[in-house]
Image (spheres, helix red, strand yellow):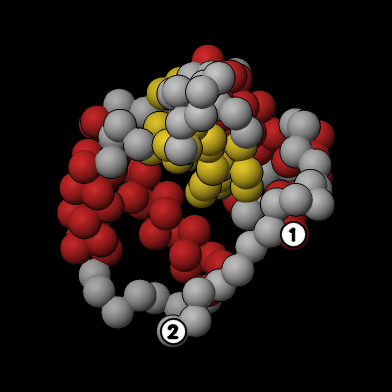
Amino acid sequence: MATPVIRPAHPEDLPALAALRWHWTLESRGAHPSSPQEAFTTHFTAWAQDHAQSHHCLVLLRDDRIIGMAWLALVPRVPHPFAPDRASGDLQCVYVTPEERNTGLGGELVTAALRLASELNLERVTVHSSDRAVPACTRSGFTLHPNLLQAVPAP
């Protein structure tokens, strides 16, 4: 079995990434979405192409098969006199296939995303994590911050 590799996603990876997202939904919700997988793949692929400048995807591969992904969403910030070009990041959709879990690969994806954030000079990176992923995030450097708050908009 080959050593896993992390690299930026390529356009030809998008259908496989859509399949990961589809299976993740089945795994976490235990129910099939109302639309067919093919329709979701088409939508996902178009969305990823439309958002390629604002959402950077890293893929985790073993033997040329995608076994994980992590998305770093870039969020422009209001300029200030000492930093006219500011941005933050939001780590999204970190996923490793079930058979590859509990091996540290999720943490490697998180660490790779944080390296990318550093290369992009982002001020900070936030993450909304599942309970299962909190340890990987904290081992990679995420901490609770008392000034970072969240609100759910009213319908």
- Above-or-below relation of 91 to 132: above
Residue 131 numbered tag = 1
User: In 3D space, how far apart are the residues under numbered discs 1 and 2 (Cα atoms)?
Assistant: 26 Å
Q: How many numbered discs, if any?
A: 2
- Above-or-below relation of 116 to 148: above
Q: Position of residue 31 (x, y in %)?
A: 46, 78
Q: Please name the residue shown 67% across and 44% down the image.
A: 101
Q: What amino acid type should be assigned to the residue bearing mark 2?
A: Pro
Pair 1/2: label in front:
2
- Position of the N terminus, as image quadrant, is top right
Residue 155 numbered tag = 2
- Position of the C terminus, as image quadrant, is bottom left
Q: Quadrant of residue 32?
A: bottom left
Q: Please name the residue shown 47% across and 65% down the image.
A: 25
Q: Position of residue 126 (x, y in %)?
A: 62, 44
Q: Please name the residue shown 42% across and 54% down the image.
A: 21
Q: Secondary structure at mark 1?
A: helix
